[in-house]
Amino acid sequence: MFNNSILVSQKMADYLWQKQQVTLNNIANVSTPGYKAQYVTFQDELKSKLGFYNQGSASTIRDEIEGTSIKVHTKEEESSRLDGNNVNMDAEQVELASATIQYQMAINDINNEFNRIRSAMK
């Protein structure tokens, strides 16, 4: 029923939602001794899968998009703080703002695609 552009936008919105949650968790734990910041990945995995299946059928590409997972990782870099916490508040705030704007863009993409489908049905 839906084309792959809606599916990619949906997966991107899911990723950006998760990224916001992880970033907010990092910000909430900025004062927790020993806390290691986390981050999420999705785009690289999707890009590699779609690059491999560039000439594939729409259903093959759809299966690869659906099979792309969002992964949460822990930043293992050394902390410059004495308590071992490696959260960089400035970087986290920038990530949160960026993810929020990108999330809104992904939602707008989905809405625009549905509007095009609605318009074509009329």
Image (cartoon, rainbow, N blue to C red):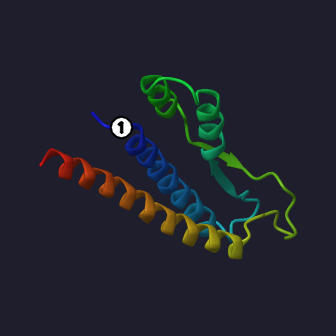
Q: Position of residue 40 (x, y in %)?
A: 62, 50
Residue 99 in the image: above or below residue 17: below
- Badge 1: how crowded within 10 Å, few (<14), some, or many (20+)? few
User: Residue visible at 42% across and 24% down?
Assistant: 59
In the picture, measured across the screen, residue 82 lies left or right of residue 16, that is: right
- x 69%, y 74%: residue: 89
| Left or right: residue 55 compared with residue 85 | left
Say which quarter of the image contains residue 115.
bottom left
Above or below, 32 against 19 in this view is below
Give the percent coordinates (x, y) of residue 46.
59, 39
Task: Identify whether 60 is placed above or below 78.
Answer: above
Q: Position of residue 6 (x, y in %)?
A: 38, 45
Residue 16 vs residue 2, the one in the foreground: 2
SS label for mark 1: loop
Spot the residue most to the left.
Answer: 122
Q: Which residue is mark 1?
A: 3
Question: Can you give x and y, in whole percent of width and height, for residue 21 in the image?
Answer: 51, 58
Residue sitting at x 65%, y 69%: 92
